[in-house]
Image: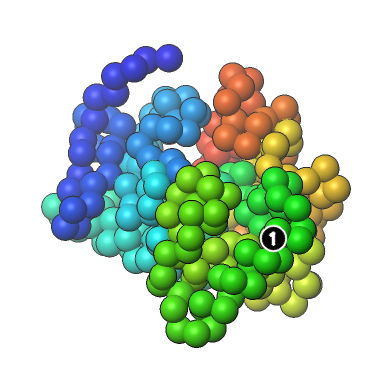
């Protein structure tokens, strides 16, 4: 597609920027958060979504966080939602365009940010969208044998329980984490059952889901990639979404939630991209956002 994108670069807090994909700011905005390793424009469906939202008079603002690109290994969901909160406050201010509606959409680990934000600062936005909300723990397990995983986990857990969670782990860990420097805290958060990042695993207890999905009180859409290469074959995606829906407030769970047919994790195919964009626009209409 196009390689150049006119728009506005917002300097929303010291040394942090967010890019709005339009030269004419709109009163309704979707804040987009990428996944691990993502930064501005690295998620392939963004341009298609920008165009779709424009037809509804919404604009898309992609946030750059400390955790963008290679920063996720030394960051946390708690850090991310503070960054998102400062962008939300800025967008609502006169300086940021006095925006009237804000939806937060995450791709992959950005979905963890989105659910974490809804649970902690849900009153500051209008709705959330979770796309490619996969379990990092289950996806990393596809790449590593269980014994190696156990050994690495216990090394990281020892540091964490010794109050050294901020320490960077040795090179072997970084290699497993897509060559990303990673702290003991973040490793455990992602790899250990019940870690702070563990929102979407298929083996979570019902009580856990009640305390996450069950506590959401703003409208939200789940757009799960049907052919997601980071989800183990053993996971029944329909059943997983059914479990989340059963624990959710029916007034908040979007009836447009579901699988994106034929979609890879980051929805790189054309038809699935259009399908996803329709899910998003129908969701906006469904809740009169």
Q: Camera-side residue: 22 or 226?
A: 226
Measured as percent of width and height from the top left, residue 114 is found at 50, 57
Residue most extreme to the top: 1
Measured as percent of width and height from the top left, residue 178 is found at 52, 44
Classify 69 as above or below 155: above
Classify 47 as above or below 218: above
Question: Where is residue 6, by image quadrant?
Answer: top left
Q: Camera-side residue: 47 or 127?
A: 47
- For this view, does 86 lie left or right of residue 126? left
**Residue, x 55% and y 31% (percent of image)?**
277
Measured as percent of width and height from the top left, residue 23 is found at 22, 29
Q: Quadrant of the N terminus?
A: top left
Mark 1: few, some, or many residues within 10 Å (few <14, many ≥20)? Answer: some
Q: Camera-side residue: 168 or 16?
A: 168
Q: Mark 1 — residue?
A: 149
Secondary structure at badge 1 equals helix
Q: Is residue 226 visible?
A: yes
**Residue, x 64% and y 26% (percent of image)?**
272
Measured as percent of width and height from the top left, residue 62 is found at 35, 42
Total labels drawn: 1
Q: Is residue 275 visible?
A: no
Classify 180 as above or below 83: above
Residue most extreme to the front: 171
- For this view, does 234 lie left or right of residue 134? right
Question: Where is residue 219, by image quadrant?
Answer: bottom right
**Residue, x 59% and y 19% (percent of image)?**
270
**Residue, x 74% and y 77% (percent of image)?**
207
Question: Where is residue 282, by image quadrant?
Answer: top right
Residue most extreme to the left: 95
Classify 85 as above or below 9: below
């Amino acid at each position: 597609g196009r390689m150049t994108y006119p728009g506005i670069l917002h300097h929303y807090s010291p040394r942090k920027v967010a890019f709005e994909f339009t030269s004419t700011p709109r009163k309704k905005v979707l804040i987009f958060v990428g996944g691990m390793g993502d930064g501005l424009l690295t998620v392939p469906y963004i341009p298609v979504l920008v165009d779709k939202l424009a037809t509804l008079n919404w604009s898309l603002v992609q946030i750059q966080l400390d955790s963008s690109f290679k920063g996720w290994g030394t960051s946390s969901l708690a850090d991310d939602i503070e960054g998102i909160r400062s962008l939300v406050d800025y967008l609502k201010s006169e300086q940021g365009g006095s925006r009237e509606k804000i939806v937060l959409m995450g791709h992959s680990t950005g979905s963890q940010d989105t659910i974490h934000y809804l649970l902690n600062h849900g009153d500051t936005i209008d709705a959330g969208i979770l796309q490619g909300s996969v379990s990092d723990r289950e996806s990393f397990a596809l790449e590593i044998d269980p014994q190696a995983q156990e050994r690495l986990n216990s090394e990281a857990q020892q540091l964490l329980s010794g109050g050294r969670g901020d320490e960077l782990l040795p090179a072997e860990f970084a290699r497993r984490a897509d060559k990303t420097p990673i702290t003991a805290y973040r490793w455990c958060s992602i790899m250990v059952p019940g870690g702070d990042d563990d929102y979407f695993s298929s083996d979570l207890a019902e009580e856990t889901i009640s305390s996450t999905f069950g506590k959401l009180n703003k409208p939200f859409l789940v757009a799960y990639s049907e052919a997601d290469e980071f989800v183990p074959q053993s996971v029944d995606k329909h059943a997983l979404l059914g479990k989340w829906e059963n624990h959710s407030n029916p007034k908040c769970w979007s009836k447009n939630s579901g699988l994106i047919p034929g979609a890879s994790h980051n929805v790189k195919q054309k038809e699935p991209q259009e399908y996803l964009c329709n899910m998003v626009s129908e969701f906006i209409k469904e809740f009169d956002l």
